[in-house]
Image (cartoon, grey):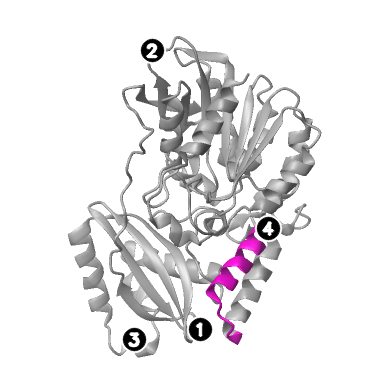
Amino acid sequence: MKKSILIVFALLFFTTASFAQNVISLFNGANNFFQLLEDGKFTEAYGNFDETVKAKLSEEQLKKMWTDIHTALGKSKSLEAVQSKTQGDFFAVTVEGEFERGTQSFILGFNKTQKIVGLFLAPKPVVSKYLAPSYADTTLYAEKTAYLNSPGHQLAAVITTPKNLKSFPMVVFVHGSGPADMDETVGPNKPFKDLAAGLAAQGIGSIRYVKRTMVYAQEFRKTFTVKEEVMDDAVAALAMAKTIPGADSKNIYLFGHSLGGMLAPRIAAQVPDLSGVILAAAPARKLSELMLEQNKYLFDKVADTAKLAKTQFDLATAEIAKGNITQLGTMKPDSAILGIPASYWVDINNYDQVAAAKKLIKPRIFIIQGGNDFQVGQKDFDLWKAGLSGNQNAEFKFYPELNHLLSQQVEKGTGVQYQAFSSVSATLINDIVAWIKIK
């Protein structure tokens, strides 16, 4: 069973979570319960139930339920806790399940002692499907699959190139945090796929690839930093971009989204001949500060003023504060903080992305930010703008209507918004094209 990588960043970048008694603890409890079911350890799994449930549900019935699910849907490919919220004195955790022949989500009810008091099959939501945007004119470009190779790793990739052009710029897309496919799929939305199509239709090629955390998840259960998570593969993809037939090797760009944008200056420092970097919804602050702000936003959005809810918020705040470390001290590098090794926190907290961008000499910089983005906001945009105010190579554009997935929205929502389909803004794509073509 694949477990979630970087659980906290699911909150930071692609969350639908509300606040729970102890989000990390509840998520781990839910994941461990399903891991026991997958391992056939039904007695141990059954031990997680409260006595009131055991009076109504036998261990044999639990085993039969799980066997029936496997019969209907096949073996599980992933089971991950994705959402938690208060239900009176109880805590409901939603676990998304992906199986060989379909999907099924589950809801686990926990009491205050974190014993399971309910297990339910969640009704399948009506989710809109991905649709190709109007600017994706396939007569103007071609796509082919390939593999991105970096030492010891091979990642599936898609190369998108404009037709009937002998020379064209290339863009490499770098993901936000957590596991992600080559399209950076979130619900029915595929931001990188949209961007690749929109750019290619106007004469700009691109490379997008599966993020390492999705393919080599087992490597991220030990010590690691953003070097292994993001940077090594981004540098390899930029080198690959120069080898694409028709690509102008002196016209290569990096498009970093969210965490990818935050790390873009650091990546660019390793690729001195890079023509430009695009920072889309890129944090200018420390991740822990952003997480605290997101927690406050979502807490206020729920508008739950109950004493229990406030206690949960305070617990979440205290957990996040543990990620503020800048040195290990007596801690081991693989010590877990919010499910992430201490080595990761020390590395990312000692990185000043605005200062790193100021040190860049050659590459042009384009910073874009949406006003309906509840995950990374105008405060970050303003910090980038202030920090790079003297850089004549830097350009800034604020889009009041865009959310974190770069699509137009009528309001600033929550992660639930990501379950509705909406393409990347055509206006944004046109602006990126115009910026790239003004060499």
The alpha-carbon separation of the residues under discs 4 and 3 comes to 38 Å
Mark 2: give few (<14), some (14-19) or many (20+) Cα within 10 Å: few
Q: Quadrant of residue 356?
A: top right
Between tags 4 and 1, which lies in front? Answer: 4
Among the two numbered marks 4 and 2 on one chain, the one whose residue lies closer to the N terminus: 2
Looking at numbered disc 1 in the image, what kind of residue is underneath it?
Thr
**Tag 4 residue:** 288
**Tag 1 residue:** 113
Residue 50 position within the rendered picture, expressed as x and y whole percent measured from the top left? 40, 85
**Tag 2 residue:** 164
User: At 44% from the left edge and 55% from the top edge, which residue is drawn?
Assistant: 418
Identify the secondary structure beneath mark 1: loop
Question: Which of the pair 20/277 is nearer the observer?
Answer: 277
Apparent side of residue 378 relative to residue 17 in the rendered image (left or right):
right
The alpha-carbon separation of the residues under discs 4 and 2 comes to 47 Å
Among the two numbered marks 1 and 3 on one chain, the one whose residue lies closer to the N terminus: 3
Among the two numbered marks 4 and 1 on one chain, the one whose residue lies closer to the N terminus: 1
The alpha-carbon separation of the residues under discs 1 and 2 comes to 65 Å
Residue 114 position within the rendered picture, expressed as x and y whole percent measured from the top left? 48, 79
**Tag 3 residue:** 53
Looking at numbered disc 2 in the image, what kind of residue is underneath it?
Asn
Residue 146 position within the rendered picture, expressed as x and y whole percent measured from the top left? 39, 25
User: At 61% from the left edge and 34% from the top edge, which residue is drawn?
Assistant: 278
